[in-house]
Amino acid sequence: MDELLPHLLSFPPHPPPPQPLSNVDYDRNIKILVQTLNQVAASKLASGVSGGGDLLDINTLPYLYTLLAHIGGPQGGKQGSPATSKLFAPGGALWLKMVEFMDDFDPIQVRYAGQPWRRLVETVAKVARAVSAPTVALQPVRAAMVRLDPTTSCFTSTHTLFVRLCLEARAYRIASPILDNDIYHFPGSLGKNPTNAPLLCAKHDSSSSYINSASGLSDTLNHKDHLQYFLYGGMLYIGMKRWDRALLFLEFAIISPTGNTASMIQVQAYKKWVLVGLLLKGSPLPMPRTTTSQAARLYRAIAKPYDAIAEVFKDGDISRLREEFEVGRKVWQDDCNTGLLLQVLDASRRFAVKRLEKTYAALSVSEIARRTLPDPNIQAETEHYLGSLIAAGHLNATLTQSPDSSHPSILRFAASPTTGPLARSEAQAYKELVEQTKRISKLAEHIKETDRKLAMTKEYIEWVRKSRKQKDAGGPMGEPNHAMEMAGDDYGGDEDMMADL
């Protein structure tokens, strides 16, 4: 082991040189280090060094490979399974080293060791599951994801792993920092000869430049992975009662193309999407326009009880809605949607009150009770309920109490969105406008990056070549210039590009 130390400690140099290494030198030296680590036997990495201790005290990549050597060696338990070893149990010596590494690793170095990094992350999740304590893996896995890619905008297999852990632990809010970052990219292919790809250690405009099919930072993905991510993410948002984001995630799941049919993951997403739409909008939502006709027919055929609930909800008949709930109780239980249906029942009263706003400027509490409750004599409870709706921001109205206790209080609806307790100030409107502008600018940047990558693909290059031939022959052709311009300096001409492929 001692003879390996000089090689393992040679990079990155300590102390750092006065002149930082160029990207080319950094790339060359770290690749030599990775090659060395790949050739060293795991048993040697896990062994001690003279003077005591082991390699778990040095740089990121040797540290990572040494951890994996311990995981796969005798200390990993029976057949190399860390889940059977006390050392790997939460709180154990090697567990603490694993989670410490996931908080502190060098994000540039692990780009060169994607598969070992992913194996470590998956091991932490596996150990936590094995002891029925998924909660202990949430913070380390999330920290590792954010440290590798602060935007978490490129979808990886770790995304699905993380949201599944959160769902198993019922830790809804800890998922927010990941779920709130929109997915813009999927790991792509570099082609046969990616000479135009920037060095891994260079500055990248998008994480999708170093998270790709060859990086090992994500396992091989299929349609099931991203469907599960959006379904589980929607369920986590439901747990947080963030209905707008829940609806968005579930919609992503149901509109995703999967051939000529739909998977059961999408059917489950559709059932929840119907209910969340009622909670957010107060009425059934139209099928998203991008849903295929085959998928739409399947959703409606399998989810008939949910569509029936939505139609009754729209009619505003609370008594009939409760009857429909009781009739379908076993369906809701089998689908694990009983809790969501109970929230729909509670929301039916709220939307019944809001519907009155479209017709009346003011109503007495007794009249509201008569129109929204089976028992119209519960006036005191109705007044308290209306006050809670106003306080929670669900109702833009004011509740005026009569000086004469024999007369009911009056609920007055705001005349317009610019008046009443929910009216926004100019400062609030300006803040929302600035935030929206930032989101649009961010989206435009990702679109530009996607266009640039599109111009690098073999399919696009072949299309450009055919278009030019058609133009030379006097035939019709498309307009390839836009994506070429988006490619910027990376676009080196048709012939050079084809040579790279």
Image: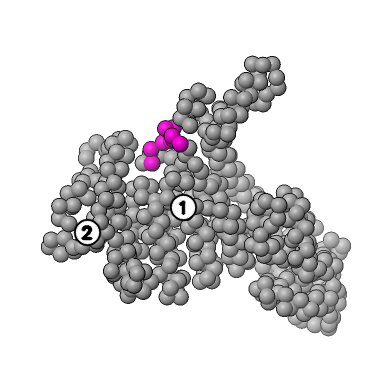
Q: Residue at x 45, y 60 (%)?
A: 142
Dots 2, 1 in contact, CB < 8 A: no
Mark number displayed over residue 44: 2
Viewer-side label of 2, 1: 2
Camera sees residue 302 = yes
On residue 125, the disc is none
Query: How far from the left and from the top, in percent, is residue 465?
Result: 59, 24
Amino acid type, callout 1: Ser
Q: Position of residue 36 (x, y in %)?
A: 25, 48
Instruction: Give the residue drawn at x 53%, y 53%.
Output: 221
Q: Which residues are drawn in magenta?
A: 192-200
- Residue under the point 46% across and 30% down: 500
Viewed as shown, does residue 71 lie left or right of 410?
left
Question: For residue 310, what is the image quadrant?
Answer: bottom right
Q: Is residue 199 magenta?
A: yes
Helix or strand or loop: what does disc 2 sit on? helix
Front-most of 129 and 45?
45
Relative placement, left or right, of 39 versus 346 is: left
Q: Is residue 425 visible?
A: no
Distance from disc 2 to disc 1, alpha carbons, whole Å, reads 28 Å
Please state the horizontal and vertical placement of residue 96, each as a whole percent of the image: 32, 67
Q: Which residue position is annotated with label 1?
A: 218
Q: Secondary structure at mark 1?
A: loop
